[in-house]
Amino acid sequence: MKQLSFETINGDRSIVIIGSGMGGGTLAVLLARAGYHPVVIEAGDEREWSIADEPATGRPFGIAKNRAIEIGGGTNLWHGVTAPLDEEDFQDSRPERHPGWPITRDTLVPYWAAAATFLGFREPTRLELGHWPAELSAHATDLGVDFTRVTPKLFRVLHKPTRLKPILLELERKRQLTLLRGCRARRLEWSQDGTLAEAVIVNRGGELHRLVASQIVIAAGALESPVVLLNSPGGEPGGRYNRMGHVGRYLGDHPMAFVGKVRVQQPRRAPLYSDMSDGMGNRVRIGLRPKDIPTFGNSNLYLRPSFGERSNDVEDKILLSMVALRRPSSVRIKDLATILAHPRVAYRAVANRFALPVRYRHADLFFVTEQGSERISRVQLRAAPAADGLREGGYHWHVPDGDLRRLDVMFKEVIAPSLQTGGLTLTAAPTIEHWREHFTSAAHHLGTMRMSATGENGVVSSDLRLHAANNVWVCDGSVFPSVGNANPSLTICALAHRLFDHLQPLLRATDTRTDVQAIVDTPGGLPRALLTGATGFIGRTIAKRAAGRLSVLSGVRADAPARQAPGRVRIDYADERSVSAAVADCDVVIHAAYDPNQPMREGEFAGRLVDAGMRAGIRSFVFFGTYSTYDSLRDRVDEASPNSSLRLPYIVGKQGLESSLRTLSEKYPEAKILMLQPTIVTGAGGSWNRFFDHAAESLAVVLPHGGAAPLNAVDVDVVAEAAVRAALGTTGLSAGFHKFLLNGSAASSWADRIAASAKAQPPRIARAGRGLLAESLVMNLLLCLKYTGGRRWHYPRLGVAPQSDGKMPAQALTLRGLDRLTVAGWAVVDAAAARRAGLID
C-alpha cells in the first residue's frame, strides 16, 4: 500500500474531509477561509457526473438522478429550496420513532441563519412566515384555505442555487485547500488502542493509498458514509464502532407524489403558493402541513398550477423523474418523446420550477411526507468484494405501510376539509393504492449514521463525533435522527457551521499565535487580515499590495452577486453571528466595504465589526473615511482643511463612522483603530477616472470656481499601501484612535485633471461628431431627470451620489450641452422641453 502525500500548511494538525457536498464542502470552505487548509477526498472531479443509484432490493428510488459524483457533490443538483426543521421534529411524541434529535431546535436556529447567509440569502433570520411583512404573509389566504387544521410552512428559494464546485476550485487555486480528485475513501485505520483513526485508505486509480490525518470528517452522504465505516475494522455489526448495529440502518427519505387535483371555483392569482419574489432577489413559497403532527405525521402539501380536473399518471411520472435534473437539457431522451406527446408536461414543469404569474383554475396536490424510522430500511455491504478487496454498498429502501395509512387518514380528516371549506373542489382524490404505486424518492437520503445522546441509540454524538472514537466526525444527511418534511440542505449546511465551531479549538490547540507583530517577525508567518469590500476598486488594490505580506480573507456583502462570491466569505453586517464568523481567527480587520444603499449605517456596521473582533482577540482595525473637496477650498487640501459641509449621504455616513470609531476607542482602550481619509481616489478602473474621461468628452463642464478648486487626488496604490502598512502595525502607533489624510503630492485642480484626460485621448475628441455629443447630452438629461425625480441614484460612469433629498447642490457639479440647455443646480428639465430645443429626437 502506498503512502499518499499532499502539501499542507498545518503539519500534524491536518484535517481530511471525505466528500465535498453540502456538508463536507461547506465545512471545507469554512476551514479553508479560516486558514486550516483541509484536504478533501472527492470521488469525482470537475466534470458533471450524476447517477441514478438504485437500491439492490426494496423500493426503487424512482427518479432520473439521485447522486452527483463530482466536486460539490449534491449541491450541483440542488434547486435552492430551503426550510428549517419544525419544532415537532425534535420531539419524541410518536411511539414508532426511535429516540430523536439529542439537541433542541433552538440550538440550530443561529446556525440556520449562518447557513442562510453562507448560501446567499439576505435577511437570513427570516425562517418563518411570521417573520415577513404582513403584505407578503397575507397572500397565504389567496386560495381561501381554512387554517383550522393546517398551517402554512414557508420555503425560501434561491434564484441561483449556490454551487460549491466553483468556490472549492477557487480556494484550491489560492492554495487554501487540497482537492484529491478521483479518490474514493474505502475504510479507516485505527490506532493501537482504537480510540483514534490514524489514516484513511483511499482507492486512487485502482490502487490503495494511505492518507494520514489528525482529524477525519466523513461527509460522503447517507448512501456512502456508512460504507466507509462498515468496511473499517470494528465497523461491522457488533464491532467497537458499531456495537448496536446502527451503522447503515434507518435509511430515510421524503416520499413524494402527485396525489390529486382541485378546481378553483373563482380563478385567482396565488403567488405565495406558486413562488413569489421576496423583494431581495430570491423567492418564497408555502406549503400546508397538519397542525396535529403526532397524529397525522409531518407531511407537506403543495398546491401547484395545473391543467384539467383529472390526474394523468404518465405526466405525473415524467415530472417526478425530473426532480433531480440540474437543467432542462438534462431530460432523458426516452422521456423527450413523451413530453412532446403531452405538451402540458412542459407547462406544469415550468410553472412548478419558476415563479410564473399564473391564475389558478386547477391545481395539482403534490405531497412530500416524512418517512418513519425503520431499521429494515438500510445501507449494507454487498457479499462479493470489489477489485480492491473491499466491498461496495447496497441499499434497501423501505417505506412502512403505517406511513401510507396515516397519510390517507390525514388527507380525509385534515386536507380535504381545509380545501373544501375554502371553496376548492376536489376533482381527483388520492388512495393508498395510488400512493403506494406512484411515490418516489426526493433524493434526500438521510438517517444512516444517526445522531444520538448515547451509543445505544445511534452512531454519532450531538457534536457529530463518532461515539467510540475521538477524532472521527460525520457531517452530512446521514446524521438526521428524523427526516422532517423539508429539503435538508439548509440543516446540513447549518450542521457544518456547528461542526466548524467544535473543530476550531482542536485545530488551534497547538497554535502559537500571539499578536500581529509577533507573527510578522516569525519567519514565514503572515498575519491574517479580513478585507471587506474585496471586490471594490480600493479593496482589489489592497489585496494585490498585500500579496506575500498578509494572508487575506476576502469578504463581500451577503447580497453580493454570485460572480463575486467564489472564494470569498459573505458578510451580513446587520447580523452579529455572520460578522463573528467572518472575523474568527483573523489578526486584523481592514474595512474597505461601502454600501451605497445604507450609508447612514456605516457607524453601526463598524461597531459590530469591532465588537466581534475584540471578542476574537483582534486588536488592530483599519477603516476608511473621506476628505471631500466639493467645497469652496481655494488652496491645497491638507489636514488643516475643514471637511465638507455638504450633507451628502456618503459624507454624512463617513462622519458618523468617525464618531462611532471614537466611541469604540473609548470602549476598548487596548484597541488600535486607524481611519484613513483619502481625497479623490484615482487609478485605472476607478469611478473617478471614468468621470474625468466622460467630462473630457462632454462639450462643456461647469465646476466650482471655474474648475480652480483644489483636487489633490491620491492614487489608489498609495491608499492601498497605507492600508497594508496600517494592518501590519508598522506605523509605530500606540493603542487608541488615529486618523490620517491621504492626499496627492501635487496641488492640482479639477480643471487640470479633466484637461489631462482630454489630452490623453485627443483623437477620440476630435472625431466625436454629432453622434457622441448627442449621446453625452442624453446622458446628462437622464441624470437630471433621475435627480429631480427625488430617487436615490448612483451613476456608475460619474461615480457621484446625491443628497438625501435626491438633488445635488449647484456648487457640486453641473453639466451643460451645446450652449442651448443649461443644467444649473440640477434644475427641472423634462423630455418635452428637450425635444423642443432640438436636443433629442
Image (cartoon, helix red, strand yellow):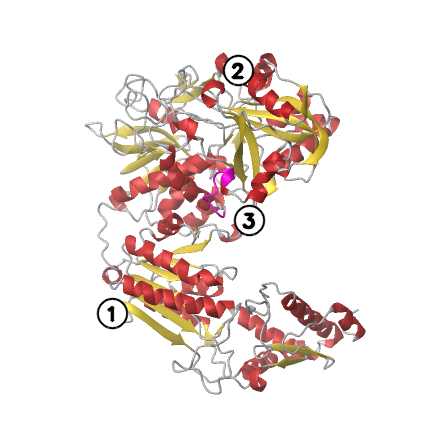
* Residue 802 x/y as whole percent: 56, 68
Q: Is residue 164 magenta?
A: no
Stretch in magenta? 122-130
Query: Which secondary structure, mark 2?
Result: helix
Mark 3 residue type = Met
* Point 58% across, 17% down: residue: 412
Gap between marks 3 and 2 measured at Cα: 39 Å
Quadrant where the N terminus is found in the figure: top left
Mark 2 Cα shell of 10 Å, populated few (<14), some (14-19), many (≥20): some
Task: Give whichever of discs 3 and 2 has the lower sequence position.
Answer: 3
**In the image, which is nearer the foreground, mark 3 or mark 1?**
3
* Residue 20 x/y as whole percent: 43, 38
Residue 727 seen in this snapshot: no
| Residue farthest left in this picture | 193
Task: Give whichever of discs 3 and 1 has the lower sequence position.
Answer: 3
Query: Does 317 appear above or below 754?
Result: above
- Classify residue 465 by image quadrant: top left
Q: Please state which of residues 85 and 23 is positioned toward the viewer in this rendering.
A: 85
Mark 2 residue type = Leu
Q: Please state which of residues 599 and 723 is positioned toward the viewer in this rendering.
A: 599
Mark 1 residue type = Ser
Residue identified by numbered label 3: 280
Q: Which mark is residue 734?
A: 1
Gap between marks 3 and 1 measured at Cα: 43 Å
Q: Which mark is residue 404?
A: 2
Q: Is residue 124 magenta?
A: yes
